[in-house]
Image (cartoon, rainbow, N blue to C red):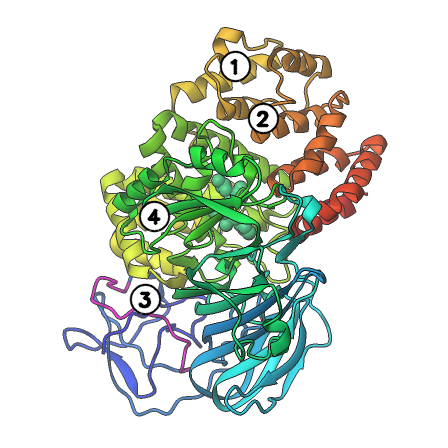
Amino acid sequence: MLLSLYLQKRQFPLYPVKSPLPPNLKLQSKSGQIRPLTLPQDLYDPLIDYKSNIDSHTLPLKCSKPAAYVTTHSLYLSCNPNPLTPPPMAPIDPHSFTDSSHPLATHISLSLYFDFSSSTILASALLSLSSPHSGPISLDARSLSISAVLNPQTLSPLPFSLSSTTDPVKGQSLTVSLSNLSQFLIVFSTSPSSSALQWLSPPQTFGKTFPFVYTQCQAIHARSIFPCQDTPAARIRYSARLNVPRQLAAVMAARHVDRRPPASGEAVMACDDAIWCGEGRVVEEFVMEQSIPPYLFAFAVGEIGSREVGPRTRVYAEAAGEVLDAASREFAGTDEMIRVGERLFGAYEWERFDLLVLPPSFPYGGMENPRMVFLTPTVIKGDASGGQVVAHELAHSWTGNLITNKTNDHFWLNEGFTTYAERRIVEAVQGEDIAALNIGIGWRGLVEEMERFKDNMEFTKLKTNQEGVDPDDVYSQVPYEKGFQFLWRIERQIGRPAFDEFLKKYIATFKFQSIDTDMFLNFLKANVPGIENEIDLELWTEGTGIPSDAMEPVSNIYAKIVSLANEFKLGRMPREDEVADWRGQEWELYLENLPKSVEASQLSALDACYRLAESKDYEVKVAFLQLAISSGCRDHHSEVERTLKEVGRMKYLRPLYTALVQGSGKEEEKIFAKRIFLEARDCYHPIAQGVVESILSKHL
Ligand code: BES
Ligand code: ZN
C-alpha cells in the first residue's frame, strides 16, 4: 500500500511520520533500494513526491518508532512485525481538549428543540467513531448542561465527567468512558450565554413579530452548542433535526431534507416526546454529507424568506422589510463569480452556494459556512461592492472549507489563501484596478497591525503559537494580508501560469483534509524545486514583521489616491473633479492613508464637502469617525453613538471603541464609550460583547 508521509522536523525524533502506519509496515523505496533516513539532513529536503498516486488521508500516528526509509522520489511501505507502542497522550490543538490517543468522531446526529422563551436548546447528540473504542474520549464543551451520556442501543448510562474548572479559552472538557463502543449519546442543553448563539427578541428583528436565533462557530464556539472535538483537525459529517415553532423557518449550512410535523420517538432523549410533538411545532431536517471542521456548523431560525438569484444560489434573509429585494439586486452577479472560481481553483464541490443576510448584529462581514454563506447586511450598499465579501466567502469554498487549517496556529492557510483567491476573482469580475485598490487597502491594514502588535510580535507571524490565547482576542489582518503577500510573492517568483497550476494541484491534493504550515511548505518545495533558494520561506512563515520582499500594489488609481492623501497632510483638500468617480473603496483607501491624527478643522472641512460621517458605506463612515475621534474632534459623537448602536460587526466596533478609550486625557470619551456599551450590549452577539469588554477592560 502507498501512503503519503509528512516529515516534521519539530516532532522528530518521536514522531517523524504523521501518516497512518499500520502495525506491521515499514518503509521501502520505490525502486527497491532502501536507505535509512539520515537525520537531521533529510528533514530539510523536499523528500516526498506528492504526485505519486498517494492515498493521502492523514490518520493519527500509531507508532512511536517507525522504521522509515526514504528516497528522493517516493515512499513505500512493507511489513514490519514490530508491535506498536501506544503513543502518549497529547493535545493535538492548543484550543481543544481533543487528545491524540483518542479516536476522532466521524459523524454527529443532532436533535435540537428550540425553546425561545428561555433562549436555550434542549438537545441530544449521537457521536459515531469509525471503530469501537474502549477507554476515555475527551470532548470540548462550554456553557452546556450535560444531563446524561448513554449507550444508544441499551440506553444504559455511561460514566462521564465534566471538568469542574473552566479554562478561560477552552472551556470545559467532557470525558466519556467507553467500553468497546463506536457510538454514544449525549443528552444536554445549551444556556442563554452559549457564545456561538445570538438570540434576538422580536423587537430586535426587522419584522418585530417573531424571534430569531443564529450561530457563529468560528473560531472555537461550536462547543457551546454541542459537545464535540472542536478542532479543525477533526472533520465530521452530521445530520440534524431542528424542532422549531411552526411560524418560523430553519436554514443550515447543510442540505435541507424535509420540513414536516414532529414524529413520536425522534426526540432521541433531547426532551420529552410530548414536548417534541407539542402543538404548533415543526421539524426541519438537514444533512451534511461532506466532512467539515466543526467551526463550519451553522444554522439560523426565524421568519426567513428567500429569492432565487442564480442557478445554484438563493439569497435568504428576514422575510419582512426590504432586505430581500436589495440583497437579490446586490448579489445578482454571484454565479459569474462561482464560474470564475471553478476556472481558477477547480470544481465547486458543495453543490449549492446560498447566501443568508443576517440582522445587523452579525459580528463579521461574512462567514464561509458551506452551502450557505452568512453575511452582514452592511455589505448591501446598492453599488455591487458587496461582491468583494461574497468573493471572499466563495473563495473559502476551496481554501478553508476544502483545505482547512489544522489548528488556529495555521489560520493564515485559511485566510491568506482566501484573500489571494478573493482578489483573483475580483480581478476577473471587476477588473485589475479594483483588485489593486483592495490590495492597497489590505496593505494599509497590514502596516497598522504591525503597530498594534508592536509589543506582542508573535502575532505578526504567519505561523503563530496560540497556546493559552483566545483566537478572538488576536484576530487581525496579519493572516489575511501577510498571507496574501506571501502567496503573491511566490506568484511573482514563478509567474502566474505556473502559480495557477500549483494552486489547482494544491487544492486537488489536499481537499477535505486539515493541514498545517509545514505540509504546505513541503508541498511547495516538492512542486517548485529550488523555491527555498529564491524566497526565504522560513522568514515568511516564522519571522515577525513584514519581509522586505513584500510589495505595495502598482496601479495608477492607487498611486493617485495615496498622493492625494499625502497632499491632505500639507493642507490640500481633494477637488470635486478629482473625487467625482470615487466609490466607497477609493474613499476608504484615501482615509486609511491619512495620518492617525489630523487637524480637527481640516477634518470638518473635508466632511462639510463630502459628507463622509453620514456615508451609507460603513467602511467609509467608520474610517472617518475613527479619524475624527483620534484627532480629538467631538463634532461627530452622535454619529459614533448611532453607528455603535445600529451595527454589531466587529470590524466597526473594534476601531471605534478603541479610538474612544485608547490613550490618555480621554476621560469624556471613556465615559461616553462605557455608556454606549452599557446601552448597546444586549444587541451585540456574545462574541462581540466579549471583544468590546476586553477592549474596555484594557483601557479603563
Ligand atoms: N472566516 C472569516 C470570519 C471569521 C474569522 C470568523 C475568524 C471567526 C473567526 C471570514 O471568511 C472573513 O474573513 N470575513 C471577513 C470578510 C472580508 C475579508 C471580505 C470579514 O468578516 O470582515
Ligand atoms: Zn475569510
| Mark 2, residue position | 616
Q: Which of the 4 image quarters holds residue 597?
A: top right
**What crowding class fits label 4: few (fewer than 14 Cα within 10 Å), some (14-19), or many (20 or more)?**
some
- In the image shown, does 196 or 70 lie closer to the viewer? 196
Nearest to the eye among marks 2 and 1: give it.
Answer: 2
Instruction: Name the disc covering residue 564, or none.
Output: 1
Q: Give the residue displayed 53% in from the left and 92% down from the top.
A: 154
User: Position of 456 compared to 164: left or right?
Assistant: left
Q: Tell me the kind of residue under disc 2.
A: Lys
Point out the image quarter for the C terminus.
top right
The relative height of residue 290 versus residue 603 in the rendered view (above or below) is below
Q: Give the residue displayed 57% in from the left and 30% down from the top.
A: 619
| Mark 4, residue position | 312
Mark found first going from the N terminus, 1 or 4: 4
Q: CA distance from mark 1 to mark 4?
A: 43 Å
- In the image shown, does 493 or 40 lie closer to the viewer? 493
